[in-house]
Amino acid sequence: MMTEKMVEFIDEYLGVLSGGTSILFICDSFTLNDAITLNLLVGINFLKQGGGGIVIGTSLPSSMVNEDIQTRFSPKDVDLIWQAFNVGKCYYLDTTLNNTFHKGSSLKGVLGIDNDPDRILFEVSYLREKIKNVSPDTPLMILYQNFSSSILDFGSKTVLKIFRKLTANVKRWGDIIMGLVNRDIHDPIILNALIHLADFVVELRCEEGGSLKQPYFRVLKSPVSEPSSANIYQRYAYLFSNNTFLKLPALAPIFDDFKRRISYREGKILIGDREFLITPLSTFLFLFKELEKTLGINEYGKFMEGFGRKLGLEITNLFKSKYGLEGSDLLRETLNYFLIRGWGRLIKREGSPESGEFKIYNFMTISYYYGKSNHKVCAVVGSILAGILEGVTGKRWICNETHCIARGDEWCVFEAKIEQPP
């Protein structure tokens, strides 16, 4: 069994995921909800590829399953999940009730069972055979939500035996098992034992800086070798956007360099030899919205087209003259310059400046925090991109935003082409 796509960072470290794999997420109390969402997101992507699954619910009653799924995911994904349940490709084992297997739940595929280790193992094997009898070629994922609840119920030794047994079974069956554990409430020895048994381990943690909390993740264990595993143990910030888990670049070294070069004198903040004004994102959003209101959408777009183009060209020329960058290196570093200043994240790009056509998919901060809109709101970003491309190629470009997060699209998408002479 092979899968094409799970979640970006899992693919990065596992390559093409094959059966017989155990995946463990270790979280803390602050990131527990994120870890649950991430587990479910991986499961949904697995369903989208034709897979099936068995969820072992240790803390969420079956009466709350539908509501919980609806709060986490889009209606389209919710329909996909319940369709899988209705056709017998997925089952939810509710261990929070003392119902027998045959009583189950009013929801199809949601079954109440006794909270007993042997019962859990029996039902997983039973339901797996049931799914395989209907769909022999369906790849399966066993999702254990979560091990911490079972450790509190049964003790660590019993849960380690459960995980070891399930891991051995999926390796024999060619399936996948995935679960999570909250590190805040367990002895490190238990965590180390679980890590030892798992093939792939991701840790989600929270770093506190003053009153701010920054969630991050890092890969503690991966079965792949170089070059992907070179990133193991690096900490990456993350966020969820439209049911998508986004891994953000490791920016700490860059900001550490900024802090070392910051000076403050005569009311000016300087980083290196350049002056900066630090202001909240809400200030920019207020400014942009006031300009839209005052100028009107069309005139606002024309204003931002000129402003953004000059800004992108200025920064590109600075990188070219100061650091001697050219071509793809100049384009990459100029885009990174805006990234580390909070403008957003580049998801993927298509085409190249050399081809005369360039398309990028972005998570844009302005669009994400703008709120719902009936028009595209990233006029300045598209113009900045046009200016960057002009600085890289020496030719004038036109850039249009075709999709916008503020209008409900998954990403902000910009399509740029070299402007043809009249």
Image: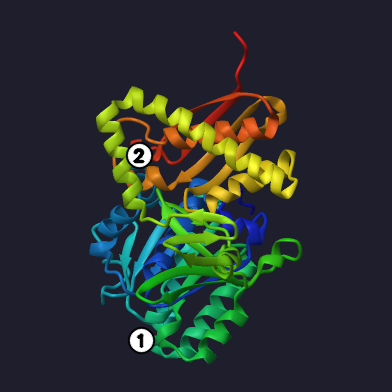
Seen in the picture, residue 7 relative to 95 is either above or below; the reply is above
Q: Is residue 349 visible?
A: yes
The type of residue carrying mark 1 is Asp
Instruction: Tell me if 25 is positioned left or right of 228 in this view.
Output: left
What is the crowding at mark 2: few (fewer than 14 residues within 10 Å), some, or many (at least 20)?
many
Please name the residue shown 47% across and 28% down the image: 306
Residues 235 and 97: in front is 235
Instruction: Tell me if 56 is positioned left or right of 287 in this view.
Output: right
Instruction: Tell me if 311 is positioned left or right of 227 in this view.
Output: left
Please name the residue shown 63% across and 61% down the image: 19
Numbered badge on residue 328: none
Residues 327 and 95: in front is 327
The residue that label 1 is drawn on is 153
Q: The C terminus is located in which quarter? A: top right
Residues 144 and 321: in front is 321
The residue that label 2 is drawn on is 406
Please name the residue shown 47% across and 53% down the image: 342
Q: Is residue 74 visible?
A: no
Q: Position of residue 172 (x, y in %)?
A: 64, 69
Q: The N terminus is located in which quarter? A: bottom right
Seen in the picture, residue 251 relative to 152 is either above or below; the reply is above
Instruction: Tell me if 182 is positioned left or right of 392 in this view.
Output: left
- Label 1: element kind: helix
Residues 15 and 345: in front is 345
Picture quarter containing residue 299? top left
Q: Position of residue 372 (x, y in %)?
A: 29, 40
The type of residue carrying mark 2 is Ala
Picture quarter containing residue 350? top right
Tag in front: 1 or 2 = 2
